[in-house]
Image: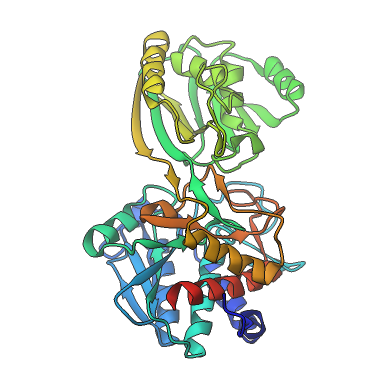
Amino acid sequence: MNKNINFLEYVKNYEKDAILNLQKILKIDSVLDEETISEGAPFGKGIKECLEVFLDMAKNDGFKTFNDEGYAGVVEYGDGEEKVAVLCHLDVVPTGNNWRYPPFSATIEDGKIYARGAMDDKGPTMAAYYALKILKDLNIKLNKKIQLILGTDEETGWRGIAHYKEKYGLPEIGFAPDADFPLIYGEKGILNTIVENHDVDDDIVYIKGGERFNVVIDLAEAATLKDHQDDFNKYLKDNNLSGTCNLKDGLYVYEITGTSAHAMEPFKGINAGTHMLNFLSMYSNNGLVKLGAALHNDHFLEKAALAYTHEEMGELTCNIGIIKFEKGQNMLTLDMRCPIGFDLENFEKTLNEWSKMYNLECKIVANKAPHYIEPTDPLVTTLYQAYVKYTNDTVNKPHTIGGGTYARAIKKGVAFGMEMPGAVTVAHQPNEYLVIKDFLTCIAIYAEAMYELGK
């Protein structure tokens, strides 16, 4: 471990520029936008702009850069044939509702920057960039190339990083600044399933809520032909929920407000969509409504007899992230986070049973295996020591999570920051923010880590 250089002392010289450049990319709406897909913009205009702005910044700072047709970008520093990956992403999840400030305003208040993407993953990405910039500006010789690889589709399908990997390959070792400190050496598998049917309901006109598999639904809306207003208001009161009910164009329109959260911890949110299904199940025999109601608040699939806990990685979790119900085109999505040892065969059997019981069609659309690096591996111990050097925290230890990061895209990858132990998790939630003090500390940690891995 480097004992001669205190990178935190150098961070002070970059604080103003780092914050300004972070605000600049935070103000760009880089949510997947299929309506503006074009050549060089495979995921829409906003993501293309964000990638180009970032790469222009790096090019102007004297870095070697590369743009893979809008699918990914690379910022590189160092020498030698071996490469170390720092896997980041510039796309963000949809903003959702109930923001204190406009979600792309990058407003600073009380030492925090509020914006969608502040913690996931533009803040950590900018911290990694300035860490690499400090190494370059100090003319520190590295015997390996550090490649800051900028993904553009991490929150949806990983198509960007897959395109880059297929054409150019990825380093075998590195880290993703897209999770928690001290360090994540294991990630649960991610199993995405679509459940659907084509049954028309004689009362329900439509139900809608959610935009992503991996986000708890924070707002759900439904309409019925019959009047259930009294029962709906009672349901809101009994469940301590906020919502409205109005007569519009001859339909009774209901809204429920929930609380979004990351799918890896669905129990930290309030799923407005499953609450809506639970309420409507009193009036409907539609299999999709009945299944959604049966899974309401069953975050660990205990009622579905699929509960599983791994000694180290914890419980299996399940999130319903999207609900669309209209004119017999009905679907909901399941995002499951699966520890090592989860019985996929038994789950597929249960899917078939659901299909028969509820008149549904169920299909697995994505299945990412769990990712695990031995906690004694030198990669883990080197990065952990870099964290300890600038935090003096020896109490919190490397661990595993339910989230999925780009770390699993490479053979020996771990997730490394930048959420500090004990901090409130704000990724994918309204009023997402970054603590500026932690951001600056993180730059020093990443500089130390890159120096150690690159030398």
Q: Is residue 39 in view?
A: yes
**Quarter of the image where one finds residue 443:** bottom right
- Residue 422 point in image, percent of width and height: 72, 53
- Residue 432 point in image, percent of width and height: 63, 55
Q: Is residue 155 above or below residue 189?
A: below
Give the camera-side residue of 92 and 98: 92
Instruction: Please name the residue shown 56% across and 14% down the image.
Output: 281
- Residue 206 point in image, percent of width and height: 48, 25
Q: Is residue 252 in view?
A: no
311 to the left or right of 169? right
Q: Quadrant of the N terminus?
A: bottom right
Q: Quadrant of the C terminus?
A: bottom left
311 to the left or right of 188? right
Instruction: Please name the residue shown 60% across and 42% down the image.
Output: 261
- Given the current orientation, which residue lies at the most extreme left position? 167
293 to the left or right of 109? left
- Residue 215 point in image, percent of width and height: 53, 41
Instruction: Please name the residue shown 35% across and 56% down the image.
Output: 43
Instruction: Please name the residue shown 63% across and 87% down the image.
Output: 13
Q: Which of the colour schemes (rainbow, by chain, secondary structure, one colour) is used?
A: rainbow
Give the camera-side residue of 214 and 109: 214
**Quarter of the image where one finds residue 197:** top left
Give the camera-side residue of 439 and 140: 140
Q: Is residue 454 above or below residue 312?
A: below
Give the camera-side residue of 442 and 297: 442
Q: Looking at the image, how many numbered discs can be counted on the residues?
A: 0
